Amino acid sequence: MPLGPLRASPLVEQATEQLREQITGGVWPVGTKLPGETTLAASLGVGRSTVREALRALAGAGLVQARQGAGVFVIAAEPKEDWAAQLRRAAVTDVYEVRIGIEVEAARLAGRRRTAGDVAGLTAALAGRRAAADAGAGDAAFVDADIALHAAVVAAAHNPVLSALFKEFVPTLRKGLIDMLELLDLRSGDPNHGDDGHAALVDAVVRGDGDAAGRTLREELEQTLARLTSL
């Protein structure tokens, strides 16, 4: 497909898309040196600054690489997949194994770093989980309340990287947990499934016993992982 003038809309996005199509379509194979900025700008009907931004976007996607004094070269035929996309495709059991490592460490840190505000947040989150069960909430609402409690534990660790990682996992975890509750019917005889373990977790963090918090959470998460594996 030859390059052509662009429409009047976000020009950088259009330029990036057309150049990407040339690469993924095999017009410019891996190892090819791209035409210069001036040539590309003339073909696309845009300024060199637009081409420069488009090339920067393609470099960020892992498709091209600028080599000092030599030009810009194609280094891959397909863009690299971002973290969020990988998580969406991942099996929930794989995500859960990583979750254990993240949350257990977060619980240990929370036991040492929790503040009065964190204690209030954890207490409220535990009450919210219990309220969802007492109100006869469906599995989705109960899972949301459960995740809110776990998020409060991670937040009490006061580590923004752990918090960001946990946030990325939430969509995959939420779906997996809802499916598990529905398939195994775990709440039919116990609407507040797992309350004792969650209460013990909150108590350990509030008491400042990080090691106990980590052990308690590891046991709870490993039990859940075993259930997910059995599906």
Image (tube, rainbow, N blue to C red):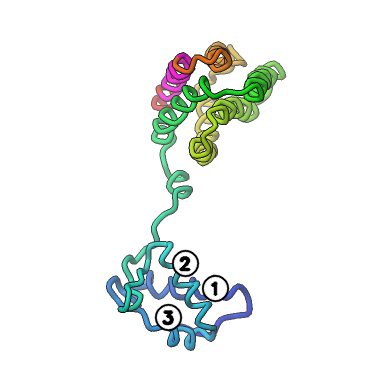
Residue 204 place in picture, x, y as percent: 53, 14
User: Which label belongs to residue 12?
Assistant: 1
Label 1: element kind = helix
- Which residue, as the protein is rendered here, is positioned at the far left? 31
Instruction: State whether residue 74 is above or below residue 198.
Output: below
In the picture, the disc for residue 57 is 2
- What's drawn in magenta, residue-wise? 212-225
Circle 2: residue type: Ala
Q: Is residue 181 left or right of residue 79?
A: right
- Which secondary structure lies at badge 3? loop
> Residue 1 got which mark?
3
Amino acid at the residue labelled 3: Met
Task: Give the residue at x 48% y 84%.
Answer: 41
Q: Residues within 10 Å of mark 1 (few under 14, many from 20)?
A: many
Q: Position of residue 140 (x, y in %)?
A: 62, 30
- Asked if 193 appears above or below 31 in the picture, the reply is above
Q: Earlier in the sequence, mark 2 or mark 3?
A: 3
Residue 57 percent across, percent down from the top left:
47, 67
> Disc 1 marks which amino acid?
Val
Tell me, yes or no, if residue 129 can be seen here.
Answer: no
The extreme right residue here reads: 135
